[in-house]
Amino acid sequence: MSTSVTSASAVSVRDLRKNYGAVEATRGVSFEIFPGEIVGLVGDNGAGKSTLTKMIAGDVPPTSGEIRIGGTSVQSSSTTWARDHGVEMVYQDLALCDNLDICANIFLGREITRRSVLGYARLSHDVMMAKAQQLLTMLEVKLPNLREPVTALSGGQRQMVAIARSVAYEPKLVIMDEPTAALSVSAGQPVLELIRRLPQRNVAILLISHRLSDVLTTADRILVLRRGKIVAAVRASEIDEGELLHLMAGINVPNED
Amino acid sequence: MNAKIAETAMSTENVTATAPSRQSFEAERSNWRIIILILATLAIWIGFHAWTGVFISPRNLSNLAVQAAITAIIAAGLCWLLVAREIDLSVGSLLAMCGVLCMLLLQKAGLDAYLTILIVLLVGVGVGLLQGGLRVTLGIPSFIITLAGFSWLRGLAYVLSGAETLSGAGDTFYEIANGEIPTTISLFIILALAAIYLHGWVRVYTALLGPQKYERRAVNLVILALSLCAAALSAWVFATRNGIPYPLAFLALLVFVMEYSGRHTRFGRYVYAIGGNPTSAKRAGINVNRMVLALFGLMGALTAVAAIIQTSRLDAGPPNVGLFVNLSALSAAIIGGTSLFGGEGRVLGTVIGALLMASINNGLSLAGVDTFYQMIITGGLLIVAVSADHAAQRRPR
């Protein structure tokens, strides 16, 4: 695995450390993800997965180390900064506003407006509607009436709306934190299929999941995190669930990489 | 067990494509709710007219409108606070404090009416921002912050007034609540609004002429009928003997601006987004704290407006006024379909809720029924309205 920082990578992380008092959540993590690549991040509870993703998303400042988003070094930790520089996050708990319709959710916080006669910014409902429709068609996501509040949707459909929203503004990196954890296995399938279609849009994806089979079928590469360190970086096609479990648990098995 | 999984798989895969339309089903539902509220109010009017013989008259309805407007203006602000999962229990006390302040500025400080209005508005906004600021910076629930306001603002009203009621606000100030737009201009306004409305309605309706939209057409036809009735009624009430009272004109403008911005501006959409899911709103980059602060500022401003109208109407600033305003404004919002848990509610519904309650109180007074019975009936009404709403929500889509 190459650890050199190149401008071509969507995100690169070098020697990232985070200490909570005496507890070392991550102990020098380095990796990079390229555009159009899906990288799985697996690890047992407490391995440092969420600390790592929070640092990349600007939620938590690292103790030391460097994060570069699309070649730009992150100077201060802020979720707004990260978002503005192309880092999107998809959460496991279906983070949509249930009372708003699908279209409003897709554009939440980034509504398209135009100056009205009286000088205030009026929401351009028709433009947003057309763009939302276009986006969903491109992603091959079929949903009922986009004017319907998302309460009416199934869990899988909601997660697809959340994912569609995350790629609406051409981000460099989308971090997916257990995107299928709240869904049944069958409801999660269309969501995983959607994630597999995303690299066509030249976006890098960091997929965190406890369901190893999901990671194995969806990711190109897999990073294994154990006690705050990356202990293995393997191609998904070159490993199976059993070996992955061994790596996560820290039981030595021969590794070709 | 396996069969069960297969079953859920079937249901989640059940995706159908339908043509997009401008209105959401949610908006549809709230429209029906408002229609039912209006019909209920009309039924109450007819009932009281049959009972008292004087209810539906220009004089009484005009009086009723001003009566309802004071509660309605406060309830409108409360509606948006509730939608955003906040609450304000201090409105009644702020109403009294601002009323006392009006009289002090007019009489003791000798200021003119306009300067008084400006200062009282600023004080209202200031108190709102103070409470909102405490809410946001300390992270204490607004229920508690404003419960404190309920007490200290009332205390302040008594301290400022020395527990005495000043009266005699002067001619200009008296005009605010008791003055009217001249009848000819009133008639012109009503006709112009009706014409603009009709024009917009025709456009919306022609867009619905495609197949499979019968239900929407029905809603729109009912709304048209009600709006034309309202126009005819207002023309009769406000353009024959008296004109449109200023408080009513303000309320109408307020409802329009709030309903419009609720649908067509970022601010309005964020109010609902915060109510739907505050975490999501925050993650989407919405500055939730600033929104909450702004809503409290708006609440303070609207309470100050209500206080100015109230003081002008009474021509006095008693420190013990509005003891039940918190509860009546809250009742109006809830009867109007505003959810106490946030995310749901409309200003128009809330204002009609206020009108409905004021109609009952007004009618019972006309019929000579004791105030104590009015309170009992208001309580019963609240339970009926909310349980009807619950029943309607449980109905499968």
Image (cartoon, helix red, strand yellow):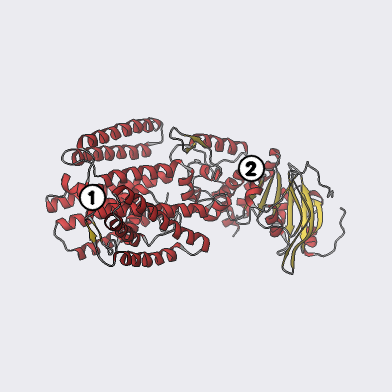
Question: Between B21 and B193, which is closer to the camera in this rendering?
Answer: B193
| Count of numbered circles on the image | 2
Q: Is residue A234 above or below residue A117?
A: below
Q: Position of residue B274 (x, y in %)?
A: 49, 52
- Badge 2: residue crowd in 10 Å (few <14, some 14–19, many ≥20): many
Residue A167: mark in rendering: 2
Q: Residue at x 13, y 51 (%)?
A: B50
Q: Is residue B226 above or below residue B329?
A: above
Q: Is residue A9 left or right of residue A171?
A: right
Q: Is residue B299 visible?
A: no
Q: Position of residue A68 (x, y in %)?
A: 75, 48
- Badge 1: residue crowd in 10 Å (few <14, some 14–19, many ≥20): many
Residue wearing tag 1: B174
In the rendered image, residues at marks 1 and 2 fall on the same chain: no
Q: In the image as oriented, which residue stretches furthest toward the left? A: B53
The image quarter containing residue B227 is: top left
Q: Is residue A71 visible?
A: yes
The image quarter containing residue A106 is: top right
Residue A175: mark in rendering: none
- Secondary structure at numbered mark 2: helix
- Mark 1–mark 2 distance (CA, rounded to whole Å): 59 Å
The image quarter containing residue B264 is: top left
Label 1 amino acid? Tyr
Q: Is residue A237 left or right of residue A211?
A: right
Q: Label 2 marks which chain's residue?
A: A
Question: Between B172 and A5, which is closer to the camera in this rendering?
Answer: B172
Label 2 amino acid? Val
Q: Label 1 marks which chain's residue?
A: B
